[in-house]
Image: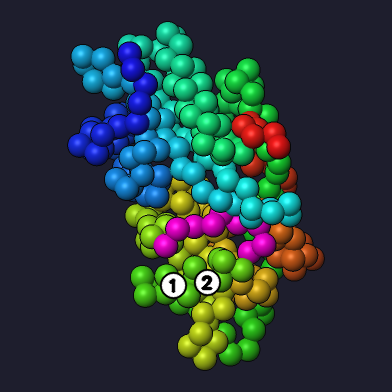
Amino acid sequence: MAIRTIEPSQHAEFVAFLDAGMRAADRPTRTDEDFPVVMAPENVSGLWGMRDEAGFTAGLAVLVRDFTTTAGTVTVAGIGSVVTRPDRRGHGLSRQLQNTVLDDLASRGVALAVLWTDRPELYAGRGFAPAGWEYHLDLESCDLSGTRPAGVEIRPFASDDTEAVAAIYAQHALRTLREPADAARLYNMPGTRGFVAETEGAIRAFAFCGKGEDFPDYVAEWGGPASSVLALLADVREAGLASRVLVPAGGEELLALAMPRGAGVGVAPCGLWTVLEPD
């Protein structure tokens, strides 16, 4: 079976195939709604599959973006949605597919491939190793009273806020360099609720709960001054939308404000990576 990127005309079929392998039948959102950038029709060059006469037998999705680091900008490929059709499992199709994709990425000068999985042992033999950590901030017992700075108004995110929120995101020292259409897709995903803090009509901070239907009870992305973010988190928790926060490296100022108020903090691996371009 040939391994290749899908044709634009196969996009709907491919998404349905991934849904069947990743989503319960009663799931309220589809794969392309939970991962709107990587699954966008414009990213068909990153959607890889294998087929037989019955349809797709295996597939995965790749999104290539630049990422800012302390050592400069690095091109990184995010790999996810790895699915094999039930009747073809155990035949090594997923390994063949991943090896072909990794070889393709390396040939294009992509430095790193990263993925997220709850079964890292499946990928250890393919060169993937733990890629670092992130903090998980638990606000369940945190005293968030009196955190709203004077003159700050907090309200739900609206689509018209996308440009302002994206500008705040762009201030992160360590971040994915998103393409122009990425922010609108990410901030308006079904199942995601956003809030913004503004002063005199200017947005200063934001927080988004969930990531599509993934990460229930979590603030998955936030940005802006830590004091304003903490005030946003008070409203998010009060609304019953989230009581935990993902805090990546570089977000330690938020931890420093929340921990003295009783917030709990844990550290967890944030994914796996394999080096494709050692230099």
Please say whether residue 175 is one of the residues in the magenta stretch.
Answer: yes
Report the front residue among 279 and 19. Answer: 279
Q: Amino acid at mark 1?
A: Glu
For residue 143, side relative to residue 19 (left or right): right
Disc tally is 2
- Could one spot residue 184 in this view of the protein? yes
Colouring rule applied to residues: rainbow
For residue 172, side relative to residue 117 (left or right): right
Q: Quadrant of the C terminus?
A: top right
Spot occupied by residue 255 in the image (x, y as percentages of width and height): 73, 61
Q: Residue at x 67, y 62 (%)?
A: 173
Separation of marks 1 and 2 at Cα, in angstroms? 6 Å
- Could one spot residue 235 in this view of the protein? no
Magenta highlight: main SS:
loop
Q: Residue at x 46, y 43 (%)?
A: 63
Spot occupied by residue 257 in the image (x, y as percentages of width and height): 75, 68
Q: Quadrant of the N terminus?
A: top left
Spot occupied by residue 124 in the image (x, y as percentages of width and height): 64, 22
Q: Amino acid at mark 2?
A: Ala
Q: Quadrant of residue 259?
A: bottom right
Q: Is residue 52 above or below residue 276?
A: above
Residue at numbered disc 1 = 163
Spot occupied by residue 54 in the image (x, y as percentages of width and height): 21, 16
Q: Residue at x 72, y 47 (%)?
A: 266
Range drawn in magenta = 172-180
Q: Are marks 1 and 2 in contact (CB under 8 Å)?
A: yes
Name the residue at the top extreme. Answer: 91
Report the front residue among 8 and 104. Answer: 104
Q: Is residue 265 above or below residue 260?
A: above
> In the rendering, which numbered label is found on residue 167?
2
